[in-house]
Image (cartoon, rainbow, N blue to C red):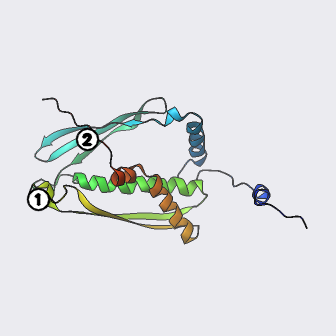
């Protein structure tokens, strides 16, 4: 009796056709991964934003250009986002608080990964939602206690995901996205930030 090795079995298995899925250009995703694998210098990116004070705690960030993949790039349009503090925090509530943008960044980063990873694995998504919460104690940032940090003490993010795959595979997709999330990495590992001032 001839024994079939795992390699032979997998080579006899028909290859899945790679096609766009979940709004992701999956062939382009794989082509990008292959191109960067062959030329690692293409992986170096620098994102930029400017911010201007408007009044009180209200400011506006502008995002338009970034560099990477061997050149300079511009978004399809210039994006502007206002930030403010809530009236209970001495602001005017004209925009979300900066810490709320941090929650948005975390959810949006992991969500983008879920879309890509599901498409790469041939899983059609039906719906994905995330809810994010962050706990902060204002004694720190108000300067009332040196024992309390200025930022979030903890954050929680919960995903509800449905698609044409078993629950375990869907959970693996979310986990892999978390493992590859740039924002999750920054929040959990920290980075050096060089602050300079011209006055």
- The numbered mark at residue 131 is none
Characterize the local packing of mark 2: few (<14), some (14-19) or many (20 or more) Cα atoms within 10 angstroms: some
Q: Nearer the viewer, mark 2 or mark 1?
A: 1
Quadrant in the rendering for residue 103: bottom left
Is residue 22 visible in this depiction of the protein?
no
The secondary element bearing badge 2 is classed as: strand
Q: x, y percentage for residue 33?
A: 57, 42
Q: Quadrant of residue 16?
A: bottom right
In the image, taking residue 73 as reference, residue 95 lies left or right, namely left
Q: Quadrant of residue 29?
A: top right
Question: Which is more N-terminal, label 1 or label 2?
Answer: 2
Task: Answer above or below: position of 139 versus 61.
Answer: below
Q: Is residue 167 left or right of residue 152?
A: right
Residue reaching furthest to the bottom: 167
Is residue 176 left or right of 7 when viewed as pictured? left
Q: Is residue 10 at least partly visible in the picture? A: yes
Q: Is residue 58 above or below residue 100?
A: above
- The x, y position of residue 69, in whole percent, is 49, 33
* Residue 140 pos. (x, y %): 14, 57
Give the residue drawn at x 54%, y 55%.
Answer: 117
For the residues labelled 2 and 1, the Cα–Cα distance comes to 30 Å
| The C terminus sits in image quarter | top left
Which residue was labeled with disc 1?
145
Q: Nearer the viewer, residue 103 or 148?
A: 148
Residue at which label 2 appears: 61
Label 1, secondary structure: give it. loop
Which residue is at 58% across, 61% downward? Answer: 123
Tell me how many marks there are.
2
């Amino acid at each position: 009796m001839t024994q079939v090795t795992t390699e032979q079995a997998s080579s006899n298995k028909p290859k899945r056709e790679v096609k766009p899925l979940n709004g992701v250009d999956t062939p382009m995703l794989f082509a990008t991964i292959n191109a960067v694998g062959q030329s690692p210098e293409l992986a170096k990116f620098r994102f930029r934003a400017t911010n201007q004070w408007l009044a009180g705690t209200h400011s506006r960030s502008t995002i338009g250009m970034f560099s990477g993949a061997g050149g300079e790039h511009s978004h399809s349009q210039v994006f502007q986002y206002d930030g403010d503090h809530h009236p209970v925090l001495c602001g005017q509530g004209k925009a979300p608080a900066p810490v709320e943008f941090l929650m948005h960044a975390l959810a949006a980063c992991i969500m983008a990964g879920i879309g890509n990873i599901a498409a790469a694995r041939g899983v059609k998504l039906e719906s994905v939602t995330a809810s994010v919460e962050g706990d902060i104690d204002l004694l720190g940032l108000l300067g009332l206690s040196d024992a309390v940090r200025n930022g979030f003490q903890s954050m929680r993010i919960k995903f509800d995901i449905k698609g044409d795959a078993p629950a375990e595979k869907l959970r693996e997709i979310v986990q892999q996205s978390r493992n590859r999330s740039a924002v999750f990495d920054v929040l959990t590992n920290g980075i050096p930030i060089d602050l300079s001032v011209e006055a």
